[in-house]
Amino acid sequence: MIGHAMLRCALHWAIPARGHRLLPRATAPARLKHSFAAAGFSRRHFKKDLLSTLDISPVTVTEIRQYLRDNNISFHDGYSCLHVRSPFTPSKDNLLFLDKTTGRFLCKETLLEGSWEDFKDSMDLLVKEDCSFLNPDTMTSYLEDSDSEEGERRLTNMEVSRIWTKAVWLHDLEEEDAQLIKVMFNLSKITNATLKKYGVKCFQPTKSLVFPWYNPRDSTMKGLKLLSAVCQDDVVDYVETVYPGPSRYHNLFGITVAGKKDTEVVITSKEVDSLAVHQATGMTTISLPRGITCFPPVLLPYLEQFKRITLWLGDDLRAWEASKLFSRKLSIKRCSLIRPGDKQPSPLKGLNLGLSLNKLLKTSLPASHKSIISFRQLRSDVFSQLENIEQVAGVKWLRYPELNNLLKGHRKGELTVFTGPTGSGKTTFISEYALDLCMQGVNTLWGSFELSNVRLAKVMLTQFSLQRLEEQLDKYDEWADRFEELPLYFMTFHGEQNIKSVIDTMQHAVYMYDINHIVIDNLQFMMGQEHLFSDKFAAQDYMVGAFRKFATENGCHVTLVIHPRKEDDDKELQTSSIFGSAKASQEADNVLILQDRKLVSGPGKRHLQVSKNRFDGDVGVFSLEFSKSTLTFTSSKSKAKVKKVRENETADASPETTPAKKKNIKGDPSS
């Protein structure tokens, strides 16, 4: 048996601070930095491969098909991609895959990939040169990264090579050491043969598991993931670090084990779960590189061969929601989902409990159904909502606990309207509001139409670091590195924009980066090019309706900043103060008002009012104090308690009543 003290000692080792962390951000980096410096890891600076700013020219599958027909290029309509003959090899059997949503291509034989424009340029060159195929080596220099990115890639390859060389197979460890590693990661029932088949090693200096990323073309090493266990207060946390960085780590762990003729696959969110499924069932099993947070579309061509896909992503509501979202990318017709529950845990947990994973796989549900004809089809979904009430409430804010008391959390598929007086700090507040969620892993897209992206990023970096970096420039790189790891993206739009262009960009971002939260700041700056309506109120209503529809159809939370109409300075804003007609407040699930009472209560005194909450009806107000040095808002220490109210008619009933005079009145949360 492994001694408890020995296990605790081993669990205090972990991984380098420069990786993708699953630990709370305040605990992991500082405590683990020294351990990895001693292990020989150098400091890294990773750049995002997927652009942080979104500037796209949308293409539809209809346009892609029409281009192929116009150029006499035969194609096969696959699940997520169109299959055409690759122009980069002489063989007619080698295929190139075109993503139906973005037009991005991948040639699996040469591993060349690029945008839709790159594909069209390649086809034009093929015709111009009058040749049967394009030399892949020549095209590589055209499509590959810049010199700086290539240098960074070489540095990454050196680190990957060093780690992999030092790592050892578990069957080569002393029996006690191997048993310790398995206990740390709950792998006692996973055999060494399974670990060897999937290429899993142990990096002894940090007691980490090493999961390789093999090149599917020649089985060379492209990258790796280290998984470490850290014990704190008798609680074990598992921490991941990936090489290269998260935006470039596209490893479908287990895909190299799959046969070319396999037609069924089980997809999990963790490598250890894939090991459990394969060992227990013998089925082809792969895991996603970023778990349930994101499914990069670049992976889709590698899954085209499978006619049936079972998604078994975890044992909680978030895993279930991710399963439904990812199945839309994969084509729901071929997908089945494992519903989480006490009797249907995650694969590794089920294996350790002695459950039959074959039987659990047989309980999978089709991702699509023709119609819901009775409560019977809804019954399990309703039970899941009741069983996981905290997860249903959404992601909690860490910096605004009072907001959790009212809204309960930040939920997907909702529309939040936010307003406040000019100069009250709407953009500053909403940037911290969104940053709080982003720091917890909520993939966020910013559309700042009034403030430039540079100024907005500067504000958010100050809020993130909680210090004035202009006075400590030597710390800029350290904080910028950490900030760059956030799942945060920006639209490149500024000023007046057409609503269709904005919606197309949002749709692209949801598909590419699995965006969960979109901030539009602000609506009035988008109205200049809307010539469909002569009435500006009708134009605004049209936009609000478009954002409402987008949030619902894509399961994405949209926060919409709208300026208020002109009001007297000595009066508090009401829900009816939102500029335009009543449609914005009617369509919104939540209405937040930043009340600025500087004229009455002195500088810096503000209140955040929740005047509508469709989730459970709780509305109210709490005080905020602004810190100019960190550009952050905090609740007032003198009166920190949230004053809750229940409105008796609609979300904009009795808005002029001051917080101290409001009474508890029964309300309707669905209004």
Image (cartoon, helix red, strand yellow):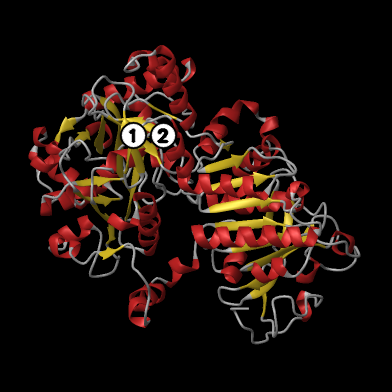
Question: Residue 610 vs residue 405: left or right?
Answer: right
**Label 1 vs 2, first from the N-terminus:** 2
322 or 121, which is in the foreground?
A: 121
434 or 516, which is in the foreground?
A: 516
Q: Residue at x 59, y 36 (%)?
A: 55
Determine which of the numbered discs, if any, sits on residue 68 in the image. 2
**As displayed, is residue 331 above or below residue 413?**
above
Q: For numbered disc 2, what is the local secondary structure?
A: helix
**As displayed, is residue 485 above or below residue 436?**
above
User: CB atoms at circles 1 and 2 under 8 Å apart?
Assistant: yes
x and y, in percent, of residue 208 in the image: 26, 38
Q: CA distance from mark 1 to mark 2?
A: 7 Å
Q: For numbered disc 1, what is the local secondary structure?
A: loop
Determine which of the numbered discs, if any, sits on residue 74 in the image. 1
Q: Residue at x 28, y 21 (%)?
A: 89
**As displayed, is residue 137 above or below residue 172?**
above
The answer to whether residue 287 is seen in the rendering is yes
Question: Residue 277 vs residue 368: left or right?
Answer: left
Q: What amino acid type should be assigned to the residue bearing mark 1?
A: Ser
x and y, in percent, of residue 536 in the image: 80, 58
351 or 373, which is in the foreground?
A: 373
x and y, in percent, of residue 431 in the image: 65, 49
Q: Residue at x 55, y 53 (%)?
A: 517
**As displayed, is residue 72 above or below residue 285?**
above
Q: What amino acid type should be assigned to the residue bearing mark 2?
A: Leu
The quadrant in which residue 143 appears is top left
